[in-house]
């Protein structure tokens, strides 16, 4: 009986640890070519583009991938098919997910300032 209780206790702690790992950050959805600075005129045959249009063009036409930029630090995004990446390309957002090294697995993207008010935004380190 004690063994069964120990197993359930470990499973419970594992579940709490997994839930605690998810965080929310404020930053910008960019692309792996431009990273934190868009210089659309130099990259797109002299055409001036918004950050959004530049990000979408780099991803669709130049095989770049989406990244998350916060305070000059660039994080890879593991799930490139995450809902909201294309919609919020070039925008400042509240991004929720799990951080593993320099890679975030995204679970939610919302316009900046629309995250759950009970979840403080964090600076990724």
Image (cartoon, rainbow, N blue to C red):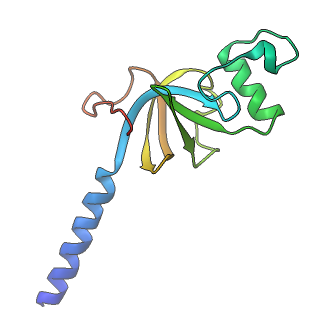
How many numbered marks, from 0 up?
0
User: Is 97 situated above or below 120?
Assistant: below
- Tell me residue 109's x, y (percent): 49, 33
User: Is 82 situated above or below 50?
Assistant: below
Residue name at image x 64 percent, y 36 percent: 66
Residue name at image x 33 percent, y 51 percent: 21
Residue name at image x 78 percent, y 9 percent: 48
User: Is 125 situated above or below 41?
Assistant: below
- Tell me residue 50's x, y (percent): 69, 12
Where, by quadrant of the figure, is residue 90 drawn?
top right
Residue name at image x 71 percent, y 32 percent: 33
Left/right placement of residue 23 relative to residue 27 reads left
**Quarter of the image where the N terminus is located:** bottom left
Left/right placement of residue 52 relative to residue 41 reads left
Where, by quadrant of the figure, is residue 6 drawn?
bottom left
Left/right placement of residue 117 relative to residue 85 reads left
Q: Nearer the viewer, residue 44 or 118?
A: 44
Left/right placement of residue 82 relative to residue 65 reads left
- Tell me residue 84's x, y (percent): 58, 33
- Tell me residue 70's x, y (percent): 47, 28
Q: Nearer the viewer, residue 18 or 72?
A: 72
């Amino acid at each position: 009986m004690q063994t069964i209780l120990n197993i359930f206790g470990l499973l419970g702690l594992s579940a709490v640890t997994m839930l605690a790992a998810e965080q929310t950050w404020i930053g910008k959805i960019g692309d792996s070519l431009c990273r934190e600075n868009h210089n659309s005129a130099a990259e797109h045959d002299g055409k001036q583009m918004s950050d959004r249009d530049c990000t979408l063009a780099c991803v669709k036409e130049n095989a770049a991938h989406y990244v998350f930029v916060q305070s000059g630090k660039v994080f890879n995004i593991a799930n490139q098919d995450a809902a909201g990446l294309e919609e919020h390309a070039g925008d400042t957002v509240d991004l929720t997910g799990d951080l593993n090294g320099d890679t975030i697995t995204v679970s939610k993207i919302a316009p900046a300032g629309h995250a759950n008010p009970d979840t403080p935004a964090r600076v990724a380190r």
